[in-house]
Structures are given as structure tokens and as C-alpha cells.
Image (cartoon, grey):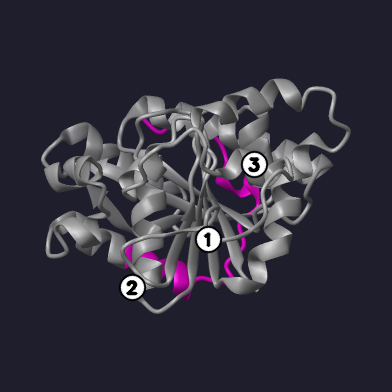
């Protein structure tokens, strides 16, 4: 039965999609059967895995609305045999309007995932950079949340907003939603602010931040333009080694549990 992980942060540009795509790749590289669900209408994760868009092809919109069967046209093969993905499409944004009057609108993705989770060891959800109903669907469908936190102050504000949303979901929609932890992204040890934020996060919340820090790297930024993960693009690079470490940490801490309130107040870290 798959462990379902939502990659989420309400702030964009923090390495959310990069983390989703490359974490999935390295979980597969380490022998796990992995499905990535691109649940962001921007569909950047789909592009990063080499998907070419066709308005006639099936995507996650059709899956959650029940208008597509689970087959090879919906579930795509990446460059790795045990790493599959379901692409997104800009039309997913229209689902927000359609869901307004739906009685179980927060549970559509969860219901779909329950049909397929026995085929995989991990299902990774790339959620939108917002706290919309799509993101709530991603969180409710998940066992836990992994939060990419860019080493800058405004990313901490996005984290605070997300934790408030998680607390609401735990109280009303999914009481056992866990937090896997925060992973520091776009870290540059040469920059003072980057070092301060990393140090303060680890000082105040040592058990809640993954050991690995994802570096700011050109190779990570350019890999999606080739339709590749960092594993397929530059497997020996610092970014690739960092995501392999993250995947190993995720596997190692499968039973770790973090309640939202344990994170405390991030407002005074910098």
C-alpha cells in the first residue's frame, strides 16, 4: 500500500515541483514503485518528466472527475521503468469552479488515489503554490506533507500559512494528516541570510527539518528544459546527490510523525 506524500508550500518559487519530480526519481532509483501526480494546473512537473501536451489526451482532471479509466493513456511512463506519472493540464484550473457545489469536493483526489495506491510504494503529489481547493484535495488525499522551504524570509511566511491550513484539515477533514518535515531548498552557504535561516530552523526545530539541504544549482534549474529529472540530466551533480540523500531520509523516517502545532511560530526566526 502506497505511502502518499504531498509536496506543498503556499508560496511559489521555493523548489516545490523540483522537489516532487526529483524525490520521485530517486525513490524509484532506490527500488520503490513510484507514481507522481501533477495536481498543479501549471503542469510544470509534467513538462519536467518529458510530457508533451495534447488537449485530447487524458490527464489528472479526467481521473478525478471520473471521465477516464486507469490505463496506459492516463498513467505515463517516465524514463525509469518503476517511475510513473499522471500529467496535469491547464484545464485543471476549471475544476475549482466545478467543485464549488460538489458535496464531497475535498475528497475527489483521495477517492481516485484509493483505487490505485495498492500498485505503488510511494505516490508523490505536486500541489499548486496556493491554498486553493486543489491543494486541500492534495492534502486530504495524503498520508503526510513534505514542505520545501527556500532559504529566505518570505518562504517562512508561506510555511506559516500552510501549517495553519494543515491544522484546519486535521480538525475537520483528515485528523491523521502527518508532516514529514521541511526541506531547505535553494541553499547557498556563501550567503549570510541563507545560513542564518538554515541555522535558526535547525536550532528551534531540530527534529522537524531534513538533514540534507538542496543547493541552488544551475543543473537543477535547467534539467526541466530537457524534459529530464536531475537523475537523468546530471546524476553526478551536487543537486542530484542532495535529492538522493533526501529520498534516503524519506525512506528512513517512514514512521516519523509531526503535528502542526509542534512547529511553533516561525515569525521570529530572522
The residue lying at 84 percent from left, 30 percent from top is 102
Q: Is residue 261 visible?
A: no
Bin the neighbour count of mark 3 within 10 Å (Cα to Cα): few under 14, some 14-19, many 20 and up: some
Q: Position of residue 118 (x, y in %)?
A: 66, 72
246 versus 60 height, above or below: below
The residue lying at 36 percent from left, 46 percent from top is 51
Q: Nearer the viewer, residue 169 or 136?
A: 136
User: Which quarter of the rendered picture does the C terminus lie within?
Assistant: top left
Bin the neighbour count of mark 2 within 10 Å (Cα to Cα): few under 14, some 14-19, many 20 and up: some
Which stretch is magenta? 245-270
Could you give the CA–CA distance between mark 3 and mark 1, rounded to whole angstroms? 14 Å
Q: Position of residue 172 (x, y in %)?
A: 83, 40
243 versus 214 height, above or below: below
Bin the neighbour count of mark 1 within 10 Å (Cα to Cα): few under 14, some 14-19, many 20 and up: few
Q: Position of residue 126 (x, y in %)?
A: 49, 45
User: Which quarter of the rendered picture does the N terminus lie within?
Assistant: bottom right
Could you give the CA–CA distance between mark 1 and mark 2, rounded to whole angstroms? 22 Å
- Residue at the extreme right of the image, as rendered: 103
Which mark identifies residue 72? Answer: 1
Which mark identifies residue 262? Answer: none
Residue at the spot of label 3: 62
Q: Nearer the viewer, residue 39 or 158?
A: 39
User: Is residue 259 part of the magenta span, yes or no?
Assistant: yes
Q: Quadrant location of residue 225?
A: top left
Could you give the CA–CA distance between mark 3 and mark 2, rounded to whole angstroms? 29 Å
Amino acid at each position: 500500500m502506497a505511502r502518499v506524500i504531498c509536496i506543498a508550500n503556499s508560496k511559489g518559487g521555493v523548489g516545490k515541483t523540483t522537489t516532487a519530480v526529483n524525490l520521485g526519481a530517486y525513490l524509484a532509483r532506490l527500488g520503490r514503485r513510484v507514481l507522481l501526480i501533477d495536481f498543479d494546473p501549471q503542469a510544470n512537473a509534467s513538462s519536467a518528466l518529458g510530457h508533451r501536451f495534447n488537449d485530447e489526451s487524458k490527464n489528472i482532471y479526467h481521473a478525478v472527475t471520473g471521465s477516464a479509466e486507469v490505463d496506459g493513456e492516463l498513467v505515463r511512463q517516465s524514463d525509469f521503468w518503476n517511475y510513473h506519472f499522471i500529467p496535469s493540464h491547464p484545464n485543471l484550473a476549471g475544476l475549482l469552479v466545478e467543485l464549488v457545489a460538489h458535496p464531497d469536493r475535498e475528497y475527489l483526489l483521495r477517492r481516485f488515489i484509493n483505487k490505485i495506491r495498492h500498485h505503488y510504494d510511494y505516490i508523490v503529489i505536486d500541489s499548486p503554490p496556493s491554498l486553493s481547493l486543489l491543494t486541500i484535495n492534495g492534502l486530504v488525499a495524503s498520508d503526510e506533507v513534505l514542505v520545501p522551504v527556500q532559504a529566505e524570509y518570505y518562504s517562512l511566511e508561506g510555511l506559516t500559512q500552510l501549517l495553519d491550513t494543515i491544522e484546519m484539515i486535521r480538525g475537520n477533514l483528515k485528523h491523521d494528516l502527518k508532516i514529514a518535515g521541511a526541506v531547505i531548498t535553494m541553499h547557498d552557504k556563501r550567503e549570510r541570510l541563507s545560513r542564518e535561516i538554515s541555522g535558526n530552523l535547525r536550532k528551534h526545530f531540530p527534529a522537524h527539518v531534513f538533514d540534507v539541504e538542496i543547493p541552488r544549482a544551475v543543473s537543477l534549474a535547467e534539467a526541466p528544459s530537457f524534459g529530464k529529472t536531475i537523475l537523468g540530466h546530471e546524476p553526478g551533480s551536487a543537486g542530484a546527490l542532495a535529492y538522493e540523500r533526501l529520498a534516503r531520509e524519506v525512506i528512513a523516517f517512514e514512521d516519523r510523525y509531526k503535528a502542526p502545532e509542534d512547529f511553533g511560530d516561525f515569525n521570529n526566526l530572522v
